[in-house]
């Protein structure tokens, strides 16, 4: 069972080696407009070797074509075009949302898991624990905490009755 999702923007075997089987890797590189298919295939091969799930951000068609474990739809992606694709049996679509409107969009996009942010990171999407609980109760989808989760505040996830989380800072 996966209970941690790690966002990466480059391929580094040292980072992947530190992860356990309960961690999934999500590759997202918003700095580059061009997706390097060979790089994605290298990450896929290495993740399969380490028995780690691998998701590609914001490109469901390519994730299907390259036979990845799934795809991640960021909060800014409102498209439902992928609903016309035939998905493989174990292919999982996951996505993120910051508010009720975006949660409803993710439900329309038929994501299996919704990452809700920001739990701890004090940015424009900051929710905190109480608002996070309220917002996450507005969906029947599985919810994963996202945003500012570190080893210092990890124990606070118990207040949510949610032991799944996603991020970057926790893993660094």
Image (cartoon, helix red, strand yellow):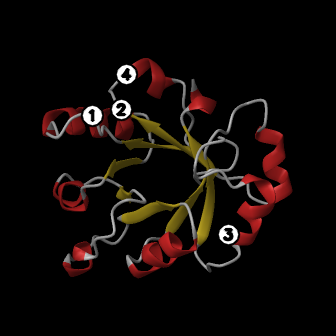
Q: Please state the horizontal and vertical placement of residue 13, each as a whole percent of the image.
A: 39, 21
Report which quarter residue 148 is drawn in: top right
Quarter of the image with the N terminus in it: bottom right
Quarter of the image with the C terminus in it: top right
User: Is residue 22 shown to the viewer in this render?
Assistant: no
Report which quarter residue 93 is drawn in: bottom left
Is label 2 in contact with label 4 (beta carbons under 8 Å)?
no
Residue annotated with mark 4: 12
Foreground tag (3 vs 4): 3
Give the label on residue 9, or none: 2
Alpha-carbon span between mark 3 and mark 4: 33 Å
Give the label on residue 136, or none: 3
Is 30 drawn above or below residue 152 in the view shown?
below
- Which type of secondary structure does the marked residue at label 2 adopt? loop
Give the label on residue 31, or none: 1
Dot 2 or dot 1, earlier in sequence: 2
Q: Please state the horizontal and vertical placement of residue 66, each as a whole percent of the image.
A: 19, 51
Within 10 Å of the Cα at label 1, are there few (<14), some (14-19), or many (20+) other Cα atoms?
Answer: few
């Amino acid at each position: 069972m996966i209970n941690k999702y790690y966002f990466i923007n480059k391929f580094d075997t040292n980072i992947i080696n530190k992860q356990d089987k309960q961690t999934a890797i999500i590759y997202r590189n918003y700095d580059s407009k061009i997706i390097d298919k060979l790089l994605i295939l290298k990450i896929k091969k290495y993740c399969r070797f380490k028995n780690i799930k691998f998701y590609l951000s914001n490109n469901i068609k390519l994730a299907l074509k390259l036979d990845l474990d799934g795809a991640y739809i960021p909060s800014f992606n409102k498209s439902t075009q992928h609903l016309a694709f035939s998905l493989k049996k174990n292919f999982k679509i996951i996505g993120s949302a910051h508010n009720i409107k975006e949660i409803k969009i993710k439900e329309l996009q038929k994501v299996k898991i919704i990452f809700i942010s920001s739990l701890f990171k004090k940015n424009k999407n900051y929710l905190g624990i109480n608002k996070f609980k309220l917002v996450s109760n507005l969906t029947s989808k599985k919810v994963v905490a996202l945003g500012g989760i570190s080893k210092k505040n990890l124990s606070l996830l118990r207040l949510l009755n949610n032991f799944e989380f996603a991020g970057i800072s926790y893993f660094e």
